[in-house]
Amino acid sequence: MKKLLVTIQSVLLLLFLLYFSSSIVFVVCEDEIGKDSTSSSLAPMEKTEQEALYSAIQSFVGKWWNGSDLYPDPCGWTPIQGVYCDLYDGLWYISDLNIGPIYDNSLKCSVNAKISNHLFNLKHLKALSIFSCFVSQNLNPVTISTLRWEKFTHSLESLEFRLNPGLIGTVPTTIGKLTKLQSLVLLENGLTGELPMEIGNLANLRKLVLSGNHFLGQIPSSFGQLSELLILDTSRNDLSGSLPSSLGFLRSLLKLDLSNNMLNGILPREIGKLKNLTLLDLGSNKFSGGLPESLGEMVSLNEMVISNNPVGGDLKRNIEWRKLLNLEILDLSNTSLTGDIPESLAEMKRLRFLGLNYNNLSGNVPPRLASLPCISTLYLGGNNLTGELGFSEGFYRKMGRRFGAWNNPNLCYRLTSSTCSYAPYGVRPCNQESNTYKRVSNEKVSRSVDRDRNTTDDFFSVRSSGILRCSVGGFWHLFCVQGMLVMFLWSAMFISITCTDFAVGDEYGWKTPKSKNDSQIFNNWASKNRFIVGDTLHFEYDKDSVLAVTEEEYEKCYSSHPVYFSNNGDSVFHFDRPGLFYFISGVSGHCERGQKMIIKVLETAHPPQSGAEQNTTIGTSQGNAAPGFYALSSPTFVLFLVSFVGPVLVV
């Protein structure tokens, strides 16, 4: 018994010791974990760094702000929206600074906002963005040309000034000392002067956007040194002079947009060395001297726009169009091109948009163009094309007004034997016999002798109006005329506009991107398509919404009063004007993850109106309504008259 009691006591003692030791270990471990978890959150900000930040912010938003609502500092538990920090040697430093209405609760700039020199005391700043902060050139003009940018030489990787019309003056040459810079965006500001050659020293630069300012002079040849550059956009400025051949060294370049300037001279053949380029937009400049043969070597191109330039030259002579197998958009309208339309254009199987209108092209239209599997827009108007169009009635029906061949006096379309068929707008039917109208007159005489005689070989021809035509004789002639009148009035009452319905995201639909790598999925989709007035967007989604917003709201990913809102899972948006349209998801966090897109809508290539068309009583579409129908007064009464009085009038 004693042995049993000793054994029980030993076991109890052992259990007690084990429990006590485990409690000690647990407490020690818990204390160590607690110390580690709070060490980063309680890490202090260097005093001079905090003073520099507070002074810099005050210069933007006003002296009223002192950061008193932040604890223990801007990188602590209550951070400023748009300000981000990194740890260096156990201390917090500012890494990203975004000023302006970028986020919902961002600090807004005051009317007297300035850029303080304290900003340049931020020792580890990697990204600086000033958005819509300097809004007036008259009330508060601001310059950046005298600031100490060289102090960011070893840290700054991204510098952006967006939508600051009050930001004036020139771009400082000291920008060229920011050797770590990867992104330089100066978008829609009031900057002027020539572009500094020193930008060419930014060897790590991948994105250079200078559009929407008032820059003058030539594009610096030093830009050719930016071997890592992916995007170069100098559109919508006042740049002039010729294109430097050194741009041909930008072998990594994906997008080149130089549109809407006053650039002139011959397009350098070196441009053909940009083998990775997907977008080339040289539209609305003054380039001349013909299209260089090297354009045919740009095999990665998806979009080529050279419209509204006095380029001249023979379209067929130099370029091997068959090599551009990835091309989806080719816009050469209003470029003074001559010669025939090359058959090889029909070998670009991905082509969706082909604009050759308002040139001096001649010869026949290649029938093979209709075989392009993706073609949705084909403009050939305003040339000297001749002969008979070899396209089918089905092609005209599919294209509608997206096929334009008006203002080609010697061009005609083929009459078919079907009762009623679609015809191309603004193109006359080809005369099958020279005495057509004479035989129609003789038919009336023969009817007065013998009404019952069938003259099935006679034809009644109607000049093309872009709607319908009929061609039969005898009894069926009467039937067709009456039917034609009814259909004409019906089409006058209900004229529909042909447009394209785009499914947003194609098979992917309208939903949040799966990863950061897909954050541009919708803008990439939009860049692969060509949109014109009258087109329709079709959003399909589940438990989401779509908002059309302003550019400012797009940047903030938030809108309290959107231009358009829908959350029914199957939303339709109609483009009723040219310009830029901005779309975001209305679900919190989705836009920030990439569920947003910008779409550029182009003006429809309208044919010139005749006097009869100008005096028509048919109204025009307004607003965001779907391409609809336009009514004439008293349609029922008109149809009643045609149905009962028509036979008497015709016979």
Image (tube, rainbow, N blue to C red):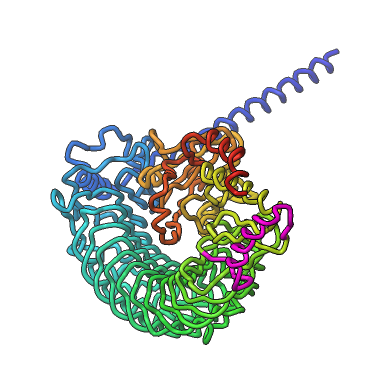
For image coordinates 15% across by 50% down, the residue present is 140
For image coordinates 51% across by 76% down, the residue present is 385
The answer to which quarter of the image holds residue 416 is bottom right
Q: Nearer the viewer, residue 402 or 607?
A: 607
- Of all residues, the one furthest to the left in this rendering is 139
x and y percent of residue 308 in the render? 38, 71
Q: Left or right? Give the position of 644 relative to 236.
A: right
From which residue to which does the magenta span run? Answer: 427-455
For image coordinates 48% across by 41% down, the residue present is 630
x and y percent of residue 373 in the render? 66, 64
Q: Left or right? Give the position of 526 relative to 555.
A: right
Q: Which of 488 and 345 is in front in this view?
A: 488
- Of all residues, the one furthest to the front in this rendering is 449
Q: Which of 306 and 407 is in front in this view?
A: 407
Q: Left or right? Give the position of 371 relative to 217.
A: right
Residue 341 can be seen, yes or no: yes
- Of all residues, the one furthest to the top in this rendering is 1
x and y percent of residue 607 in the render? 44, 61
Residue 303 can be seen, yes or no: no
Q: Does the magenta stretch include residue 636?
A: no
Q: Nearer the viewer, residue 111 or 306?
A: 306
Q: In this view, does 429 lie above or below 649?
A: below
Q: In this view, does 24 lie above or below 242?
A: above
x and y percent of residue 286 in the render? 33, 76
For image coordinates 50% across by 85% down, the residue present is 293
